Structure formats: C-alpha cells, structure tokens
Image (cartoon, grey):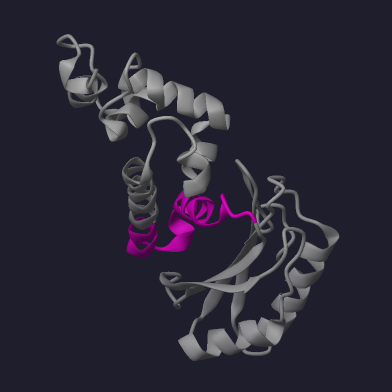
Amino acid sequence: MGIKDWPQGEGPREKLLLDGAEQLSDAELLAVLLRVGLKGLSAVELARMMITEFGGLRSLLTASQAQVCRLDGIGPVKFAQLQAAVEIGKRISKENLKRGKILSDPDLTRDYLMRQLGDRAYEVFAILLLDSQHRVIQFVELFRGTINSASVYPRDVVGLVLEKKAAAVIVCHNHPSGIAEPSTADRRITERLKQALQTIDVSLLDHMVVGDREIVSFAERGWID
C-alpha cells in the first residue's frame, strides 16, 4: 500500500503537511521518502524494518549502497533518494554556518561538524578558516588517517592559513570509535598548533572532537587560553 492509499488523516505525508515534519517519528519521515512499501508491508512498516535492521536512523543513512540494497525492496533508486536527503541536510547546515559569525551561535558549528564528520569510518582532521569577523572562509579537510589515528603537520596548517588569509581558525577531528573524549595526543597536537599559529599572529579559537552523538570543545574545557 502506498502512502496515497492510506485512509484520510492517517498517512505520514498528510500528517507532515498538517502538523509539521517535527511531529513525525523516524519511521514516518523515512516512509515519506520511500513513498511505497512492499507487498504486505506499508511504507511505514518497511521504514521501521529498515531502521531496526541497522539499529537506528543514523546508521541506516550512513550505510553503503551495498549494505542498504541487501534489504528486500530497496534498490538503487530508493538508496539515491535517501542519500539526496542526507546531502540536502549537509548543504543547509553549511549555508547556515556561513551566514553568521561562528562565535555568535556555537550550536551551528556543532551541527555542521557533526554532519560533516560524525559518520566517517576513518579519522579526519579538518579546519574552519575564519576572517577577522569570525565568519567562515572555508572548511578544509587536511588529513585523513586510519581508523585509529591521523598525522597532523602544523606547517601544513600554517601554509593553508596564510594562503587563505585567515585571521582565526577552529580545528576539528573525529573519533570513529564514537567516543569524543580527547586523548593525550589530541591535547599535544593542539598545543603545537597553537604555538605554530601564534608565530603568524593567528588565533586558534577551539579544537573540537566529534564523536558519535557529542562534540567535545577544548575551549569550553578551558584548554585553550
């Protein structure tokens, strides 16, 4: 049964239009994207089955095409629809971040970094380059490592900052383990970066570590003077 065939007032699409998307469950939101279910399964039942199979909506939406398409009734078209929705979310987050000053709304920064790095299976070290008004110039992924570590070279960070004429930076990296707690090595490289940037009179505003569902800020912990 497709969503259009549901009794009046019961379909997730109608519920979304009447009450707003925030009132829908994860399964109902996913059903709107899927549009139709399978024989014997409504779109919502199919969505619920998919979420259960992957252990959550986030795990489903970050899974590979091969993993998702192993499910009955899910082919390349439905996978493409889901990935398009994920990418739209990322681009909206990026636009919101560029619209204002970083420090005036730190939640925008957290949301953006979580969308960019929260689902990576490998470690990524990136940098937000800011102008003198702390507006975003560019987000750049500098280094990629194994699932356990990434090599970070202060000279490359300094070179990029000079190239882009940034006045301040926020560095960030993810922990593929999902645990955002910074390591001793994370604190050590932060100090090295801070010292290197001071030589060119550029401020290191923060180092943010992205985990599965949280982000740890060095600045909030008082680890960056």
18 vs 168, nearest the viewer: 18
Q: Quadrant of residue 45?
A: top left
Q: Nearer the viewer, residue 92 or 97?
A: 92
Q: Farthest residue to the top: give it.
A: 7
**Looking at the image, which residue is at 39% across and 36% down?**
74
Q: Quick check: is 115 in the magenta stretch? A: yes
Q: Check the picture and name the quadrant holding the N terminus.
A: top left
Which quadrant: the C terminus?
bottom right
Residue 25 sits above or below residue 95 on the image: above
Q: For the point 36% across and 31% down, which residue is it?
A: 30
Residue 106 is situated, as x and y percent measured from the top left of the image, at 50, 53
What residue range appears in magenta?
94-121
Q: Nearer the viewer, residue 38 or 24?
A: 38
On the image, the x and y values in percent for residue 48 come to 44, 22
Residue at (72, 48) in percent of width and height: 177
Give the residue at x 81% y 57%.
Answer: 183
Q: Nearer the viewer, residue 180 or 117?
A: 117
Q: Is residue 40 left or right of residue 212?
A: left
> From this viewpoint, is residue 63 visible?
no
Q: Residue furthest right?
A: 184
Q: Main secondary structure of the magenta part?
A: helix
Total marks placed: 0
Residue 114 colored in magenta in the image: yes
Q: Is residue 69 above or below residue 134?
A: above
Residue 44: % across, % down: 35, 20
